[in-house]
Image (tube, rainbow, N blue to C red):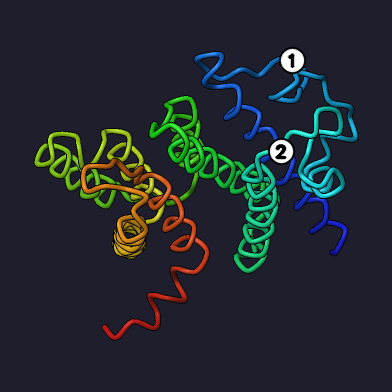
Amino acid sequence: MLAIELLLFALGASGGSFLGVLISRYPRKGGLDLWGRSYCDNCGRQLAWWENIPVLSFLFLRGRCRTCKAKIRPEYFWLELLSGLSFLVTFFWWQQQNLAWLWLGIYLLLTWFLLAIFFFDRHYQIIPDVFLLPFLFFILLLPHLYFPAAFIGLFFFLFLYIVTKGKGMGLGDAKLIFVLGLWLGLAKMLLLLYLAFLAGGLVAGFLLWRHRARWKSRLAFGPFLVGAALVSWWWGDYILARLPW
């Protein structure tokens, strides 16, 4: 089984590396650029194959381009590592569910799209439909869908969007919570919202305390929704079973 786990970690890290390329090229290309070899953002040199090994190349190169010695942004290393670990956790969750191998593939795709939404919203404060629509498609393949939870979440976020005039919550967040509610159901969605608002409040308070943000600064909420969704998905049954109700 160790070979499978290593393979899944490598697959997840490779997916994270690909996502890092999309993120880095987005502001220059004005869209998702899927073509062309990877290159150094500073000197423009095309990278050799061994400089593109997820996680390991960053460590081997000590976080710098071997030609111009410019620093490689460490967030791409963490993106690859987090993606690999997320694939592993999804695999362990799948094992406990006793599901067929086909479902593992679908849930790994859901994991990747969640990470894509997380990092794109963190970088650019947008949730691209090019990620959200395929995510919805794979959700619709699942055996259980929870439309009441989806519409409750959607109407709640639309209410927040109207009340705050789009400054406190975006339409992308409303669309995302609709899909997450459709997938996770009402109980896990409520847990998700509690965790997301709690984490968002703590991070916002910390940034204000450290003078890294102002009261009118915008903070992307999508990453908190995604992080809370992963926790609710992987461990929601365990958490909910131990709540005093």
What amino acid is found at the position of numbered circle 1 in the picture? Gly
Residue 177 visible at all: yes
Label 1 or label 2, whichever comes before in sequence order: 1
4 over 22 or under it: above or below: below
73 over 130 or under it: above or below: below
Left or right: where does residue 177 sit relative to residue 99?
Answer: left
Q: Quadrant of the C terminus?
A: bottom left
Coordinates of residue 107 in the picture (x, y in percent): 59, 48
Residue occupied by mark 2: 71
What amino acid is found at the position of numbered circle 2 in the picture? Lys
Residue at x 33% of width, y 81% of height: 243
Q: Nearer the viewer, residue 61 or 107?
A: 61
Q: Nearer the viewer, residue 200 or 161?
A: 200
The quadrant where residue 75 appears: top right
Q: Nearer the viewer, residue 135 or 21?
A: 21
Mark 1 Cα-neighbour bin, 10 Å: few <14, some 14–19, many ≥20: few
Judging from the image, what secondary structure is the residue with disc 1 in? loop
Q: Quadrant of the N terminus?
A: bottom right
Coordinates of residue 51 in the picture (x, y in percent): 85, 34
Mark 2 Cα-neighbour bin, 10 Å: few <14, some 14–19, many ≥20: some
Residue at x 31% of width, y 40% of height: 173
Tag of residue 6 = none
Left or right: where does residue 210 sit relative to residue 17?
Answer: left
Residue at x 72% of width, y 45% of height: 13
Residue at x 56% of width, y 13% of height: 29
Judging from the image, what secondary structure is the residue with disc 2 in? loop
148 over 51 or under it: above or below: below
Tag of residue 36 = 1
Left or right: where does residue 215 sit relative to residue 107?
Answer: left
